[in-house]
Every structure is written in structure tokens, then in C-alpha cells.
Image (cartoon, helix red, strand yellow):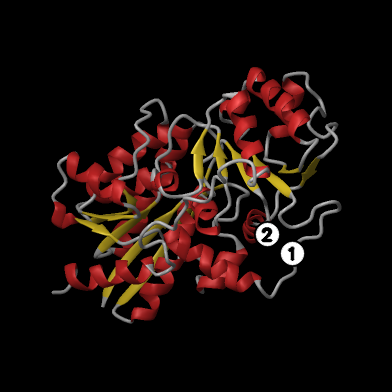
Amino acid sequence: MKKLLLTAGGRPATLLLAPLYAALKNNGNYKPVVMFAAPEGVEPINADLAACFGIGEASHTIMLPKGTSVEQLASAMTGMEKIMLSEQPDLVLVCGSDNVALGAAITAAKLGLPVAAVDAGLRSYERSDAVEVNRVVIDAMADFHFVSEHSGEYNLINEGVADEKVFYSGNLIVDSLVGLMEQANDRDVPVIPGIKPKKYALLLLNPAGRFSEKEALEMMLRLLTEISNGITVLMPLAAGFESLMQQHGMGDSFSEIEGVTIIEPPTHTDLLKLLRDSMLLLTDIEEMQSEATVMNVPCLTIMESSSRPATIEIGTNVLVGLDEDDIKSRIHDILHPGLHQHITSRSKIPEKWDGAAAGRVVAVLDRVLKD
């Protein structure tokens, strides 16, 4: 029986890992071992994912100390080295592209262990983005590459990866979405006063991203003041947002806008349900772009590029940057589909974003790992 070590750090990576772990466990030919790394005080995997995919207690958890990203990377790699030497896996499956994934890929490669990159080949071509650098390095370390969309295939082959090492398996995030939403059907949607299905916009902002700047926040305030006259805006409060507002002397400016409802951060499953029932998603983060496309929810992404072009080419996603007029125009189009071409009229679900990606990964492993 082959022993496979699956690694993950933040939530995006655990969404890739969870369905893959379940598929490997059900296959019977593998012994999947899980290794999480998480900052102190942060649960390595949320309860919904653990229950849905039968992960239970993680086999190994590395708690990362407070400090810089480099200090955390070094701590993660030190802990991973001990675990990998102890477990001696036949393959290390690196999920995602955060610093934990980077550390796992480098550590495994240094120890001479085969590496598979899960969700490989994604590129935004923004080298100023640390995550983009991670993607390139992880893919360079990998022996096998499991990609979620055709752009991943093209990128890797153009970078010199042999095509027999690239496998188009589909989007594991959609596997997690399908599993979690099936589980969520037995739970009530969170009751939020004044919020009705398909009568609100969902706003997700990253206070550590481009909205860390006062000018961007002021633009968003102007935008919300205008659009909230026609639609309720639901805004889950991201960690660090309140302190950021205080830092810029903006106090409670967002909550003071009539028509904007601010809520505490929901669980991931509840966030998916809120996304499903929204009219549109306005965000500056890549997380939830895949889910919005599969749920056919128009997504306006306040970025200049995306590592998941399938969500733009055939999905519901549109890149708007910080163009205030463009954002207002597109929101108007979404709210008045009878007057304008609806943004979702051309949208489709990308190939193999069907909830069966984990099974395809395991089928490939059955071929490439057989003795």
C-alpha cells in the first residue's frame, strides 16, 4: 500500500486537500497521511470540511509562530522535514500555492521525495505577487502536475514541463463546494435582518490587499454610497478591517452607509450559501471566483489579472480593477438585465468543474504509482 502525504496551509489549500483525502481513503490502495501547518490560534481545518470528507483529527499539525512570512516558512520547513523523514511517503501531494505549499515542495525535493503539485500551472503573471512566485517554484519542484483548467496545461508546457507529467483533472475546489452544499441542505440559511435571497450584493474585501490604501477605501465608500440606493450590500467583516479603518481615520464609515449591512465572518459553508443567494459578488480576492462561476453568480473582481482565466473566459467573472465608473456600469447592467446584456448570459461551467476531480486524480495515481 502506497503512503501519500497531503499538505495544506490556509483555507484555499484545505479545500483542495479535503476531497482528495476522501477519494484516496475510499480507493483502498493508499494510506493518505495529512500534514497541516497553521499559525498559532488558527484551526488547521474547519469543522465543516473535516466532517464532510471524514478527515477528523489531522495526522500531523505544525503550529507556526508569529513573525514574518520568511520566519514562518523556515519554521514550517523544519517541522515538515522531521515529519517527512519519519513517514517516508511514496509521494508528497502539495495543495495550493501559499507559503506552506512552497515549504512542502522545497522540503520534499531536498529530501529526494517525489512531489505532485495539486492545482498546478495557474499563473496571473504578476511577479510582484508573492503567491505567483510560489506557484512558479512549486511547479518547478514537482514531478507530477494536476491542473484545474486548460490554462494550467498551456502554462506548464510553455515553461518546458513534459506533457506526460501534466494531468487535467479538474477543479478540486468544486468537489469541496459540491460536498459542502449537499451537507448544508440540512442546515438553515443564516437569518440576517433585511437580507432576502437574490436581493443583495455580497462584498468581500481583503484589508491586507489593495484596500489597505486609503484612496481605494475612499473609492469603495463612494461606490457603496451610490449603489446601496438600489441594492442592499452585505459585507462580512474581514479580520483586520476595523483596525485598518481606524488607522486611516475613517472610523465606522462603511457601517454608517444606509443599505450596507456588516456581519461577523461566517463559516465557510455559510459564506457559500450567502454567495449562492446573492445577486452579485464584488471582491478583490481570488477566493470564491470558482464557486461564483459554478453557482452562476456574477462576479466583479477588483484586480487587473486572475490566475483562473476560465472564470473570465467562459464564467461569470469580470476584471474591473479600481475603475469606479466601470464597476458602477457593470453593477447597473446586472441589476437591470432587461435593459442590458446580462453578464451571466454567456457563462458556462468550465470543463471538469463537476465535483469529480478527486476521482480523476486518484485514477492517474493508480497509473503512475503502480509498481
Whether residue 338 sits left or right of residue 5 in the image: it is right
Total number of numbered discs in the rendering = 2
Asked whether residue 153 appears in the rendered view, the answer is yes
Checking the image for residue 270, the label placed there is 2
Above/below status of 78 relative to 215: below
* Image quadrant in which you'd find residue 246: top right
* Image quadrant in which you'd find residue 182: bottom right
Q: Give the distance between the C-alpha atoms of the residues marked 2 and 1, in whole angstroms.
A: 7 Å
Task: Please name the amino acid that badge 2 sits on.
Answer: Asp
Q: Decide which of tag 2 and tag 1 comes sooner along the chain.
A: 1
Checking the image for residue 189, the label placed there is 1
Residue at position x 48%, y 57% from top?
Answer: 14
Marks 2 and 1: CB-CB under 8 Å? yes
Q: Position of residue 44 (x, y in %)?
A: 54, 56
Nearer to the camera, 338 or 301: 338
Nearer to the camera, 185 or 20: 185
Whether residue 11 sits left or right of residue 106 in the image: it is right
Q: Position of residue 25 (x, y in %)?
A: 39, 76
